[in-house]
Amino acid sequence: MQSKLLFLALSILLLLLMVLFALTNPSYEKAFKAKWYYMSGEYEKALILAKEAYKLDPYNRVALTVMRQTEIAREFVDYIKEGKAYLEQIESIANNPPIQQSDKIRIKMMCEVMIDKYSSLPSSKLTESELIEKAKEVYEKFKRLYESLYGKSQIKQK
């Protein structure tokens, strides 16, 4: 009975020491702050802090994970922003008829770029599902637009 109590006490002490180490180590402190910023969607701040934490301690797995996940999330965010910008350009072209041949070519190129970029987005189980869904919505819009303008195609689906 006493050996079980001793084992429990040592386990709790070890956990407390680990928590104390993580909270007082500057690398882990920055890594946890980076994780917080990542979870709140502030990817720029998260990336800066994660890089600083990783620079302080290259064995800090929390910092490395947050840094990689933030870079992946930023790619999704950039894809979504670029898609919105392209859709605004396409809308302004469509609202100013007549549509020139050069405009049609620009629209086709924008669609092809966004369709190709979607297939090259990195996938990770840790990426927020909201970002993945928004990126998929952007992809679907460009895919439908491309198919409506140029017919069914051999577009790869992700």
Image: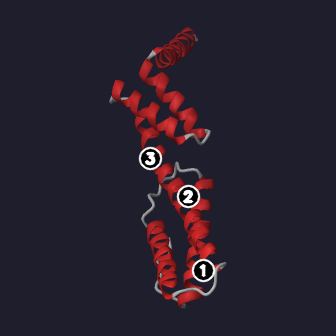
82 lies above or below 55: below
State the SS at label 3. Answer: helix
Q: Where does residue 123 sit, x and y in percent of width and height?
A: 47, 57
Q: Where does residue 94 sit, x and y in percent of width and height?
A: 63, 80
125 lies above or below 105: above
Residue at 42%, 65% in the rendered image: 120
State the SS at label 1. Answer: helix
Identify the residue under disc 3: 71
State the SS at label 2. Answer: helix
- In this view of the protein, which residue sits in the foreground, 72 or 87? 87
Residue at 49%, 22% in the rendered image: 29
Residue at 49%, 73% in the rendered image: 110
Residue 57 in sight here = no
Between the C-alphas of marks 1 and 3, the distance is 28 Å
Identify the residue under disc 2: 81
Between the C-alphas of marks 3 and 2, the distance is 15 Å
Q: Looking at the picture, which amino acid does disc 2 mark? A: Lys
Identify the residue under disc 1: 144
Residue at the extreme bottom of the image, as rendered:
151
13 lies above or below 66: above
